[in-house]
Image (spheres, rainbow, N blue to C red):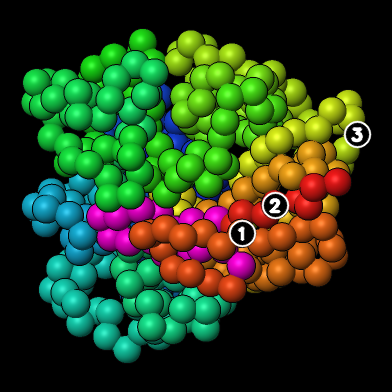
Amino acid sequence: MSCPRIAAAQCLAAIVGDGQSLSRQLTINETKLPENQRSLYRELCYGTLRQYWRLDAALKPCFSRPLKKRDLDIKMLVYVGAYQLFHTRVPHHAAINSCVEGARKLNKKWAAGMINAILRRCQREGDELFEGLSPAAASSHPQWLHQAISRAWPEAADQIFTANNSHPPFCLRVNAQHSDRDAYLDALRAEGIGASHCAFSARGLRLDQAVPVSSLPGFAEGSVSVQDEAAQLCTDLLDLAPGQRVLDACAAPGGKTCAILEAEPALDEVVALDVDGQRLERVEDNLERLGLRASCAVADASTTDWWDGRHFDRILLDAPCSATGVLRRNPDIRLHRRAEDIAELAALQGKMLDALWQCLAPGGRLVYATCSVLPAENTSSVGAFLARHSDARHIEIKAPWGLNVEFGRQILPQTDGADGFFYAVLSKDAA
């Protein structure tokens, strides 16, 4: 049953109906497809999820009756078809006919006529189908998240919603131990790969369009890594120097661990922690590809059970968060995240900050980061931490990127720009 529409519908049904993650389910369903169909499959999965709340609100009235859970694949097939009609250049007849035929291939011939009727209505009515939607549905965000973002960033909310529904840029971090950025840019252009400098990361390049990593010059040899520009900024904030002992407290999948080692090869030691052993294997894989060395350990950074008492000069805490700054890369988050999760995440972030502060040497520096745009996880978490620790000082970040907020600096997601990210720098009083 080799059909990217069917595979996409099945992937989406598992995410919407069973709560599976896109990152896990995407690969499972992709194995059913030949290589030349996988790009379309991924576009349908990611694109339909980015537009899910808008499509759901507009298409629900088109069904004469609710479908049973076992037929969620049919409902998702309709959504995939509608996504193609409204958001891709796929010819309308191909988008409709392939989804109708998909129902037959799923042995659900009874649904073929219904799919055809709904998609023909979409074709006929066009944008009129979306008239009268609530602001949240029109922006393709759940109501609670639309309200939270609008409240936090009233003047930038529309920009954030638009960015969240866009294709994310494909950014690279050039390994300074192998090449400088301009030399690698020349190597890309020699291979016919268009790219340009990232605006704020000194080692960042943004490709004109995504390519397989296997086509990147020197990728296997460690010349370059895939990493969004916003995530690349952490190394400058850490103020690294030879001889320091550095902790990456939530290290998986390893992008920041490797960036730290590339930025300052004369560090005394880098320790990479993660609570998930399987994800920590990805850190080890990235270290091996790049020819770098770090001490990796499975441990919970919200406790000090793992700590041997030796202090760190620098700590990076890229804390677990709502990921509301990277919704375009992880569009399933809009389905899985709930309003009540934010307080629980803020509590965990506070617990991690308190535990890791004990591991920081007097005079040391801790960089707190999230990929969230919600103040409850960012400035509020840092402010609450500072109130609990009299030996902690907030260091203002003076940079040309992001917005200066009470404690830290906030990058909002931008169309064709960086992901949403928050950074705060904390120093510990000398003994």
From the image, tell me which residue sits under label 1.
Answer: 395
User: Which contiguous range is marked in magenta?
Assistant: 407-423
197 horizontally vs 288: left or right: left
- Amino acid found under the numbered disc labelled 1: Ile
- 10 Å crowding of disc 1: few (<14), some (14-19), many (20+): some
Q: Position of residue 44 (x, y in %)?
A: 30, 47
Q: CA distance from mark 2 to mark 3?
A: 23 Å
Q: Which residue is painted at 61% across and 54% down in the image? A: 425
Decide if residue 406 is on the left or right side of residue 233: right
Residue 148 visible in this rendered orientation of the protein: yes
Q: Is residue 219 visible?
A: no
Residue 338 lies, in percent from the top left, at 63, 66
Whichever of labels 1 and 3 marks the residue nearer the N terminus, that label is: 3
Kindly identify the residue that appears in the image at 36 percent across and 60 percent down. Answer: 400
Residue 236 position (above or below residue 38): below
- What residue does disc 2 label? 427
Kindly report which numbered mark, 2 or 3, lies closer to the viewer in this rendering: 2
Tell me whether circle 2 and circle 1 mark residues in contact (CB < 8 Å).
yes
